[in-house]
Image: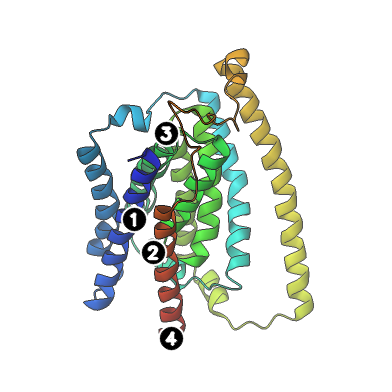
Amino acid sequence: MSKAKRTNIYMICLLTLGILFSLSYSVFKLPRSGLTYDFSEIIYPGLAVLLFFLITKENPRRVLQFHRLSVKNILYIALLTALFIPISAAISLLTQLIFPNQYLVNQMSAMGSGPLWYALIISAVIPAVLEEMSFRGIVRDGYGGFSLRKQAIIVGLFFGFFHLDFNQFFYAAAIGFFMAYVFYYTQSIISTMILHFLNNSLSVVVSHFVQGNSALQAAGNAPDTFSAGVMITAYVFLAVIVAVDCLLFRLAYRSFVKYNKKRRGGSEWEEIAENAEPEANPETNPVRNKLFTPTFFVVAGLFVLFAAFVQVYDNLYH
């Protein structure tokens, strides 16, 4: 069995566990908040990672690559995260026009209702560890024989599928694609764990700030009385901000890449072409690797079916 196929089977199991956990709360009418729900969201990703290493006997140190980061790389990651957040927010805002995200609304409300330290652990620290082990660890390693671009595509898609929601899929896939490149240039899963933690932490802090501010809550619950002209002006203003942010992000990313190429040694690094892929060889690699295989489409099918079910359910009952 190829590593890519094994990775796809891992994703099928991971999504199946996620779907079963989610459905169990609907079937048994359990509350989607509180200690039990929070830890059920942690159990199945952690269980999947644990079973993967127990069954495959892979070396976790080789797959996960917990290498030290330079201080400059940590600063670069913080900067890139701050610049990427408006981009992912814009993606979410646009996709919500088609796919309203009731789950995200409920999740942010739950994050803002408890102690800040607890919300940070549940929604930022633990996902940053377990989800990175799955996607920038196991999935990325499983597609290690592919070019960087193809690795980033598959890691991004699988990270989007994992969220089991159409709205969340788009911005999660975008950040998953980006994090694949961050991992490639730092060669350390710690870099993407930091990025993931910073990204999620902002959502938690914002949720707590909104929950604690009655004026903001009232504004959020007020009926929409804005004129079409005001709304168009607001969207144009936001588009300009996002465009400027994209430019700054591109400049920061190019500086980050340049720094890491230099850090690794220019001549040695240039030999590792980002888009290079092993040529077909009758003895070692008789068939060029295929990115989209039957097992990949099983993963995609599980996501589409369940996300469609969630969308219909939310439309009917919310």
Amino acid at pointer 2: Leu
Relative to 241, 312 lies left or right: left
Circle nearer the N terminus (3, 4): 3
Q: Are marks 1 and 2 in contact (CB under 8 Å)?
A: yes
163 up-or-down from 190: above or below = below
Name the residue beneath numbered marker 1: 12
Name the residue beneath numbered marker 3: 189
SS at mark 1 in the image: helix
Determine the residue located farthest toward the bottom in the rendered image. 316
Mark 4 packing: few (<14 Cα in 10 Å), some, or many (20+)? few
Q: Are marks 1 and 4 in contact (CB under 8 Å)?
A: no
Residue 302 disc label: 2
Q: Examine the rendering and report whether any part of residue 141 can be seen.
A: yes
Residue 316 disc label: 4
Circle nearer the N terminus (2, 3): 3
Distance (Cα) linking label 2 and label 4: 21 Å
Amino acid at pointer 3: Ile
Q: Which residue does the image show at 64% across and 35% down from the upper left?
A: 253
Circle nearer the N terminus (2, 4): 2
Q: Which residue does the image show at 30% across and 70% down from the upper left?
A: 32
Q: Are marks 2 and 3 in contact (CB under 8 Å)?
A: no
